Image (cartoon, rainbow, N blue to C red):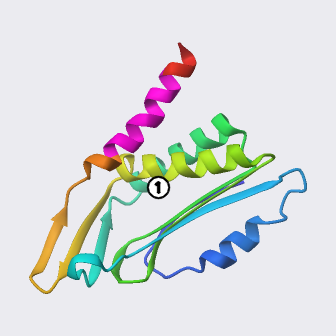
């Protein structure tokens, strides 16, 4: 089962995780990542925009790839758009698999590649105003690590 959703509304990460748990008796692993707006450096809010239709296709490609590579039983990517205040959740990534390593690696892969391969644009707000945020070099490196690993595996 795969669930891909982009929405403005808040979500309950705990409820999503509970829904995944116990859904397949062959799965011994349920792994997740939940990201929230952090308030460092005077940040007061974020605003995320996306390219409707294209974003969902990119997220589906990422989750489909993870499902095939790690033999996942469930893959969930839920990402918010619009304005979010400090402490609000932005993204939930979840995976279930028969074994823990597969679920954990799949979640890491999905969040790392999402940061560079899904068309989201982020604007930060603070006391000085607002500014668009470029992709960070560390996000590029994290995504590149997965691509390099796949190249190494297929060589």
| In-image side of 144 versus 5 (left or right) | left
Residue sticking out furthest to the front = 41
Look at the picture and state if 107 lies above or below 150: below
Look at the picture and state if 134 lies above or below 129: above
Residue at point 42%, 83% (across, down): 87
As for residue 145 lying within the magenta part, the answer is yes
- Can you give x and y, in whole percent of width and height, for residue 44 in the image? 26, 85
Asked if residue 60 shows in the view, the reply is no
Look at the picture and state if 121 lies above or below 19: above
Res 11 → quadrant? bottom right
| In-image side of 37 versus 9 (left or right) | left
- Can you give x and y, in whole percent of width and height, for residue 5 in the image? 53, 64
Label 1 sits on residue = 56
- The kind of secondary structure the magenta stretch mainly shows is helix
As for residue 146 lying within the magenta part, the answer is yes
| In-image side of 105 versus 29 (left or right) | left
Residue at point 38%, 72% (across, down): 81
Crowdedness near tag 1: few (<14), some (14–19) or many (≥20) residues, C-alpha within 10 Å: many
Residue at point 47%, 36% (across, down): 146
Look at the numbered disc 1 and give the secondary structure of its residue. Answer: helix
User: Magenta span covers which residues?
Assistant: 140-151
- Can you give x and y, in whole percent of width and height, for residue 110 in the image? 52, 49
Residue at point 9%, 82% (across, down): 128
| In-image side of 151 versus 64 (left or right) | left
């Amino acid at each position: 089962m795969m669930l891909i959703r982009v929405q403005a509304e808040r979500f309950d990460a705990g409820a999503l995780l509970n829904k995944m748990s116990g859904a397949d008796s062959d799965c011994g692993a349920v792994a997740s990542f939940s990201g929230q707006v952090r308030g460092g450096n005077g940040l007061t809010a974020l605003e995320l925009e996306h390219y409707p239709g294209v974003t969902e296709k990119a997220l589906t490609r990422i989750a489909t790839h993870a499902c095939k590579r790690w033999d996942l039983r469930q893959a969930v990517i839920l990402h918010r758009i619009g304005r979010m205040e400090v402490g609000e959740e932005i993204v939930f990534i979840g995976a279930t698999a028969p074994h823990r390593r597969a679920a954990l690696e799949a979640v890491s892969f999905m969040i790392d590649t999402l940061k560079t391969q899904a068309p989201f644009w982020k604007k930060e707000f603070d006391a000085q105003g607002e500014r668009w945020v470029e992709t960070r070099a560390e996000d590029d490196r994290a995504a590149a690590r997965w691509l390099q690993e796949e190249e190494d595996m297929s060589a």
